[in-house]
């Protein structure tokens, strides 16, 4: 038993479990061919099940999970490559892009703030939920700066991203969004990197604009949170 505890406490256990769970999630999605079976969601469920069944403390798993978390920021920064390939679109439509991202960020933050007031949630919970639509590294920074609860923020960001990646294609068809730039910005503004992975499947322009929206909306959220949050 002590040997197993040492294995679970090793950083390699958390890394291996995370990679295996996501790999299985990808296989399941390819097999069932449905966006409902999101690889990230399946990976979360599988990882949680393993930790619960074998009674493994989260702290032990996170020894390796924290290593993976370190790659979040550079992975997000790599989206700049796809943005650079569409630099001409960015130059030509800089004002509409900025306006769209601003409206998207304000709509997201404003709706969360109003709902938190409606349900009488405290300042800590409000600060945790406000940055739900931006990428995890920035969202965690906003949360910590305003006294929020980081695990709640991470869960909210993941849930928002998964929901966005599932619903984005349907909503684009429902509202008859035919412009690739508009579709990409909408996906990135509401569902950050997880949604961007879905946008890349829709097209190169959609992926590039979604990646751009992540950065622009992140900056806007940081600035607006200084006004909305204490």
Image (cartoon, rainbow, N blue to C red):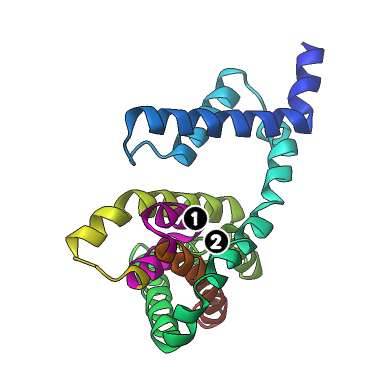
Residue 190: percent from the left, percent from the top?
40, 64
Callout 1 secondary element: helix
Task: Please state, as top left, top right, bottom left or bottom right, where the N terminus lies in the image.
Answer: top right
Instruction: State the residue in front, 191 or 93.
Output: 93
Q: Which portion, as a residue range, is magenta?
A: 182-204
Report the magenta stretch's main SS: helix
Residue in the image at 49% along x and 40% along y: 40
In screen coordinates, is 45 left or right of 100? right
- Label count reads 2
Q: Is disc 2 surrounded by few (<14), some (14 to 19) or many (20+) residues within 10 Å?
A: many
Residue in the image at 30% along x and 52% along y: 167
Residue 227: percent from the left, percent from the top?
52, 83
Q: Which mark is residue 135?
A: 2
Spatial CA distance of label 1 from label 2 is 7 Å
Q: Are marks 1 and 2 in contact (CB under 8 Å)?
A: yes
Instruction: State the residue in front, 126 or 106.
Output: 106
- Residue on which disc 1 sits: 157
Task: Please state, as top left, top right, bottom left or bottom right, where the C terminus lies in the image.
Answer: bottom right
Residue 114: percent from the left, percent from the top?
35, 71
Instruction: State the residue in front, 55 or 17.
Output: 17
Q: Specify whether residue 193 is painted magenta.
A: yes
């Amino acid at each position: 038993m002590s040997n197993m505890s040492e294995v679970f406490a090793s950083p390699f256990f958390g890394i291996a479990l995370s990679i295996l769970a996501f790999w299985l999630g990808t296989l399941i999605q390819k097999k069932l061919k449905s966006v409902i079976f999101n690889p990230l969601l399946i990976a979360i469920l599988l990882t949680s099940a393993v930790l619960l069944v074998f009674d493994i403390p989260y702290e032990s798993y996170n020894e390796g999970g924290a290593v993976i978390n370190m790659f979040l920021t550079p992975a997000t920064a790599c989206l700049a490559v796809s943005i650079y390939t569409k630099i001409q679109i960015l130059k030509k439509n800089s004002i509409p892009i900025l306006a769209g991202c601003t409206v998207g960020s304000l709509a997201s933050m404003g709706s969360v703030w109003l709902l938190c007031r409606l349900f009488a949630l405290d300042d800590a919970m409000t600060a945790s939920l406000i940055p739900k639509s931006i990428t995890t590294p920035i969202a965690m920074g906003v949360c910590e700066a305003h006294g929020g609860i980081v695990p709640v923020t991470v869960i909210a960001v993941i849930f928002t991203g998964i929901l966005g990646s599932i619903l984005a294609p349907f909503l684009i068809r429902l509202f008859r969004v035919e412009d690739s730039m508009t579709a990409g910005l909408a996906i990135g503004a509401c569902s950050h990197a997880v949604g961007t992975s879905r946008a890349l499947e829709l097209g190169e322009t959609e992926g590039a604009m979604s990646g751009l929206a992540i950065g622009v909306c992140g900056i806007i959220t940081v600035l607006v949170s200084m006004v909305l949050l204490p």
